[in-house]
Image: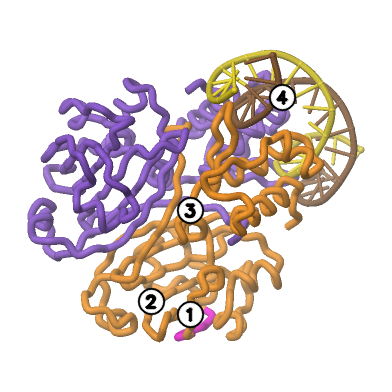
Chain colours: A purple, B orange, C brown, D yellow
DNA sequence: TAGTGGTCTAGACCACAGT
DNA sequence: CTGTGGTCTAGACCACTAA
């Protein structure tokens, strides 16, 4: 995935915001100034700013300029498609991953059928991983990776980052996902794995796709309710149902 | 809020997708064809398509075209900033709203202080509303509307749509919000209002702002866990933390 | 080779803030 | 009035897909 000029500008400004070079509450240089600074046209600068705008890093005010918004610690990465490994790194959580299961299968495991009833029989790889933070269970991730496009999944990859493997080794482009968050009753086995008191867990069910719309993966993440937190930034839609 | 040419094109294509004129799994007309169809430049058409892309209605594939994605019933409106009233209308839920409290206050109610500790003392209007679907309690919404910009809130507005009042009567532009979803223990009073068995509720805490970054509103929504569902569409970020 | 989307440009005009 | 962001355009070149 090659980065466009607009992407580079967006990342550079993001970095400057993060490092306090552009401070929350103050204005960015004007679009014309950025045009000069980065040696590009105004439309290109505007495409870069549009990215920051939709992420909630800045607010554009007509006639005045672009204000840097103050962002909560978590407001950045949690919504969107971000792997546990990436979150771990960027938040410095020092988490641990235990791989409980990893095997190839010729059809969709029963566990998934309730949440993804429309999936036809399909080969794939099933991975079950427990995530611990400070030695306490936090999330149980159950993944089903479709074959194709994923033919093999080395144990080492499961212990580290599957996304990293898919993007950097297999050179596939993860593009989008649908997610559903609900609260579910869980059985005693799961309750034991997560070490929770109640028989409830927060379930994040997601279905992710490559950029050519090929289905890539189904995931069921069971979270300890007392530790679960989902942070989101949203803009008011112009397009309404 | 005036609509740009790109917005109109985006809405028109969205409508055509909804009405099956452009079918899920098939390709939209090419950008050049849309250029002719709408009598605009290609960049303008592309800005329209970009909106549909980020909403998850289409996927653009280089060298081939833009595919219409099939969207789940709920995938459209639920994330983002959408009022209960709007959701109710678009999903045909036939919901009912009971206003439990409505009064002006000179400082932030205690209830909010835990979730929004950084808010200074501030005048505003407190509204507490119970939402029922099929005569069963679904959500308890507690809102605090800052004064200014909101000076008055007629009872009739609280029973109907506060967002509609803010946007259409007061002509204010609601722009963005931060949200946080957690699972919380609730007291027996709240438990009674929601008519739930467990002493747990899903809490959606949000802070919304006008387009000039003026804080507008704090909301705490307590959901019956067994009925809670949050659906999201996400794209993989180019900009990473 | 022809058609698709991806990117970038230089210029134009507009609406709005602040002076 | 000047400077800001908001919109639109026409044209250019590129990378990719499919025949």
Which numbered mark, 2 or 3, is in the foreground of this view? 3
Q: Which residue is mark 2?
A: B138
Q: Which residue is mark 1?
A: B95
Q: Label 1 near label 2: C-beta < 8 Å?
A: yes
C-alpha span from label 2 to label 4: 51 Å
Which numbered mark, 2 or 4, is in the foreground of this view? 2
| The quarter of the displayed image where residue A28 is located | top right
Judge if badges 2 and 1 mark residues of a common chain: yes
* Disc 2 element: strand
Q: Which residue is mark 3?
A: B71
Residue at (71%, 24%) from the top-left corner?
A41
Mark before the other along the chain sequence, 2 or 1? 1
- Tag 1 subunit: B
Label 3 Cα crowd, 10 Å radius (few <14 / some 14-19 / many 20+):
some
Residue A186 image offset from top left, x and y in percent: 16, 61
Residue at (64%, 21%) from the top-left corner?
A38
Assign the N terminus of chain B to one quadrant of the image. Answer: bottom right
Q: Which numbered tag is attached to residue A41?
A: 4
> Which portion, as a residue range, is magenta?
B99-104
The magenta stretch spans residue B114: no
């Amino acid at each position: 995935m090659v980065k466009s000029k607009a992407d580079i500008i967006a990342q550079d400004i993001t970095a400057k915001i993060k490092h306090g070079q552009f401070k929350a509450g103050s204005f960015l240089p004007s679009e014309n100034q950025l045009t000069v600074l980065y040696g590009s046209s105004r439309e290109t600068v505007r495409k870069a700013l549009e990215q920051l705008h939709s992420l909630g890093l800045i607010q554009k005010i007509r006639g005045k300029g672009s204000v840097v918004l103050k962002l909560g610690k978590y407001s950045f990465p949690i919504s969107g498609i971000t792997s546990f490994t990436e979150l771990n790194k960027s938040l410095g959580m020092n988490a641990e991953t235990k791989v409980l299961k990893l095997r190839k299968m010729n059809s969709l495991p029963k566990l998934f059928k309730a949440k993804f009833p429309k999936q036809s029989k399909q080969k794939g790889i099933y991975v079950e991983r427990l995530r611990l933070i400070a030695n306490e269970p936090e999330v149980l991730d159950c993944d089903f990776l479709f074959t194709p496009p994923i033919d093999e999944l080395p144990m080492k990859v499961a212990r580290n980052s599957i996304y990293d493997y898919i993007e950097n080794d297999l050179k596939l482009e993860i593009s989008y996902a649908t997610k559903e968050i609900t609260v579910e009753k869980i059985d005693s086995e799961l309750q034991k794995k997560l070490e929770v008191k109640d028989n409830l867990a927060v379930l994040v069910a997601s279905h992710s796709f490559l950029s050519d719309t090929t289905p890539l993966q189904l995931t069921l993440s069971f979270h300890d309710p007392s530790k679960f937190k989902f942070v989101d930034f949203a803009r008011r839609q112009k397009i309404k149902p």
